[in-house]
Structures are given as C-alpha cells and as structure tokens.
Image (cartoon, rainbow, N blue to C red):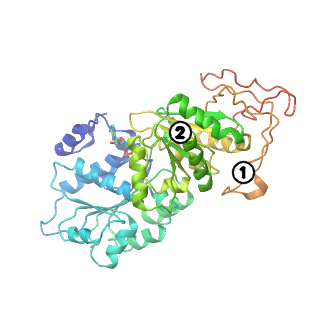
Amino acid sequence: MSFATLGLSEEILRAVTERGYTEPTPIQAQAIPVVLSGRDLMGGAQTGTGKTAGFTLPILQLLSAAPRPAAAKAPRVLVLIPTRELAAQVEESVRDYGKYLKLSSMTMIGGVNINPQIARLKARVDILVATPGRLLDHVQQKTVDLSHVEILVLDEADRMLDMGFIRDIKKILALLPKQRQNLLFSATFSDEIKLLADGLLNNPALVEVARRNATAELITQKIYPVDRERKKELLTKLIKDNNWFQVLVFTRTKHGANNLAEFLIKQDISAMAIHGNKSQAARMRALAEFKSGKLQVLCATDIAARGIDISELPHVVNYELPNVAEDYVHRIGRTGRAGSEGEASSLVCIDEHKLLRDIERLIKREIPVVQIPGFEPDPRIKAEPILNGQNRGQGGRGQSAPRMGGQARTGGGQARSGGPKPASGHGAGRGAAPVLHRSGGRGR
Ligand code: AMP
C-alpha cells in the first residue's frame, strides 16, 4: 500500500515523501481512512508504531479541506499529551507534515515561561498540542479559548492515567464543544481506559496494531537466567562484552536504580539513575547525554521512566522483571522503532519464574533463553518472595519456587553453550539445574 491511496492531499504527500516514508505503517493504513471519515477512533498503538502520523496526517487533511474565516483564531484541534518532551515532538511532526499547508500549530507545556505562550495565543492557532496542567493554567487565566475545538486527540491515554491526569482531563473535556471528533490512543486497554473511552467516544472504530512485543519482528527478546545476587555482575559482563551503549535498565525500586548506577560507575561504565524528584532541566540534560551516547546506562523504575520520553533505544534491560506483566510491554516498547532493531534483555532469577510465565502468557510467545556460561543458577538457591512489589496479594503469590522437571528451554536457535542440562525427575534431585521451563505445556 502507498500513502497516495489514502486520500491525502498532494501537499501532505510531498511532506511525507520528503520525510523518507515510502509506505504507511499498519496503524497509519488503518487509522487514516477512519479519521478522514470523521468517525471517532480508539487506537491501540504504542510509540514507535507511527501513530503520530496516523492521526496528524488526516487531521491536517481535514483542516485544510475545510478552511475557516481568516479572522477566527481559536484552536480547531486539541492534542493532549502526557509529557512535555513528547508534546514538543508531536508538535514538531505537525509542523513538518504540514509545512506545505497554511495551518499553524503551537506547543503548550509546563516548565517554561507562560508569557510567550499567552502572546502566541493572540495569533491564530489551528492545532494546539498541550500537556494537561499547563492547558488548565491557561484556562484559568482565560488566555485560551477551547470552544471551537472540532477534533480532540488523547495521546498515550494509559500514560496519562498512570500519571494521575484523569481529573485534569475531565475538566478539559467539560470545556470542549459537545459536537466534535474524538481520537484516543493507548498502548494498553485497561478497565480504566475502557471507562474513559466509553464516556468520551461515540461509536468509535477500533484500530489496533499488534503490540510490538506480540509481533516483535524488530525487538529481539532474551532471557538470561542468573542468581539474584549475581545480576549486577552479569549485567556488567553483558554491557562490556557486547559494548552496549544507550542501555535503559529497569529496576523495581528507586533504591535499586541508585544502587545499580553506583555499582556500574565503579565498573567504569557511565551510568545514572533517574528519579522524579530531579528537576525537569536535570532530567532533560541527563536524557540529552544519554541520547547522544555520552551516558552509557540509564537506570530507572517504571514510574520514573514514564515521566520522560525515551524511545527508539537499542537496548532495554529488565534488571528485574516487573510485577505487572503489562509493564513489560511498556518497557520493551522503548526499544526498536519503525524500521530499526532493538534488543530487550531480561535477567531472571529463581524468584521471578512466575512473573516470567505471566509475561509470556500476555505476549503469547516464549522468550528465548540464553545461558551465559559461568552464570548458571545454583540449584541450591531457593525462591524468595519479591519485596517492594505492587501486587503483594495472597501471601507472596507469584513467588513460589518453580517446579522442576520441565523441559529445558532452547531459545529459538540461541546458543546455550554450557547451559543447564534439561532437568529430569523432580525438583530437589541432585544436579537438577533450576532451568526455566514451561510447566503444563502451553495451556493458555
Ligand atoms: P511514532 O510512533 O509516531 O512515535 O513514530 C515512530 C517513528 O517512526 C518516528 O521516528 C517516525 O518518524 C517513524 N515513522 C512514522 N511513520 C513512518 C513510515 N510510514 N515509514 C517509516 N517511518 C515512519
């Protein structure tokens, strides 16, 4: 399929071609016709799928096909985005794709002086890309008029809810005209998202692209079995032996992120932990160094990483598996992108076998296992409950010792040189290596 068949104007196609895109990504192929038809849309897609152009291109088309009086200035499109960095990025795309059109756009984000924004709002704004907090500041100061919004986009709605923006969103929705087109994008469809969508969308078309972890052509996923206490050592080896750069490492706790960063620095690996309590400027600086490759490793918790926009990385490491399988999807979504490859590596100890099974059930695939020689798990080590978990219900459910006797996993052609022998017999048997295995086949 080509962009030319989607019903976009010559001006838009020219900008797309100049950007180097030859064909639409799956989300674009599906979403563009829906948006052009004027219908509401519920899009299941995460960053990296090309969703920004998926909504931006048809919006530009709709606006340019229905011009309004020259004197009208208030925004016709409101794009709500959870983070400042992403908002700036999306607005840049809007400008880029719309460079041959006579439409104007604006970024409205916090953390910067509000006065230039107030001045900007006195001129015409067709497409307003905003983070919720700053938009509400403008609402309060009566410096923005939302009564002419024809199209609303809620981007990364799941992150928006995770970051506690639901009340802000509701306040903003109340200010918009009832008659409008609504587009909601979310990487996951939790009950909360469904509830939000029910209240917001009118007979929406559902467009969902396979999560990248579900198809994963571009993300190589690997499991590295290792003992709990040897993870730091293994991570150091992996980074050094493979000369990994731009490694985003997820830990379960902030404390863990700090500890790990300190350890890596002692091993001569430049590393930093990011937390929410660092200033916006400090985080942006760390991020810029990380993106440029100067900073080799960034250690983060799920929450800390959510607040900043980092994606398209070559390496994401799950130093500890997340307690919630959905978070695995978010995490590995940071790597790869339309057209380039990424690697998601998970260091898995005996405490985490149940978490791993939950993840594999969710993504509907088995993740190949690679055993690094010299790091084979010690069969005498028993599983321990995972502390600091978010879902500690039912007496440490999910942290039970894995049953033995399953088949050793061979990882889709991955070498397991020196890896554990297939366990035979049951559990405690001498020499039965604590291999990762699937119990009870694939009854999912
Ligand atoms: P997004 O998911 O919108 O953040 O886009 C992810 C990346 O894919 C961005 O770097 C885009 O520039 C790129 N991209 C978007 N659409 C296409 C396309 N049709 N062909 C190739 N790359 C694309």
Above or below for 443 versus 37 = above
Q: Which residue is mark 1?
A: 386
Residue 361: where, in percent of width, then height? 64, 41
Residue furthest bottom in the image: 141
Q: Can you tell me whether the CB of the residue at mark 2 lies under 8 Å from the nearest atom of ligand 1?
A: no
Marks 1 and 2, the one that precedes in the sequence? 2
Residue drawn at 47 percent across, 44 percent down: 334
Q: Nearer the viewer, residue 172 or 435?
A: 435
Quadrant of the image for the N terminus? top left
- The three-letter code of the residue at mark 1 reads Ile
Mark 2 lies on a secondary structure that is: loop
Residue 436: where, in percent of width, then height? 71, 33
Q: Nearer the viewer, residue 53 or 309?
A: 309
Instruction: Using a 10 Å C-alpha cutoff, classify the residue at mark 1 as few (fewer than 14 neighbours), some (14 to 19) or many (20 or more).
Output: some
Residue 96: where, in percent of width, then height? 23, 48
- Residue 366: in sight, yes or no? no
What is the distance, in whole Å, between disc 1 and disc 2 at their CAs?
29 Å
Mark 1 lies on a secondary structure that is: loop
The image quadrant that residue 267 belongs to is top right
Quadrant of the image for the C terminus? top right
- Residue 336: in sight, yes or no? yes
Q: Quadrant of ligand 1?
A: top left
Q: Which residue is mark 2?
A: 268
- The three-letter code of the residue at mark 2 reads Asp
Asked whether the beta carbons under mark 1 and mark 2 sit within 8 Å of each other, the answer is no
- Position of 430 with respect to 240 (left or right) is right
Q: Nearer the viewer, residue 43 or 232?
A: 232
Q: Can you tell me whether the CB of the residue at mark 1 lies under 8 Å from the nearest atom of ligand 1?
A: no
Residue 93: where, in percent of width, then height? 28, 49
Residue drawn at 49 percent across, 55 percent down: 306
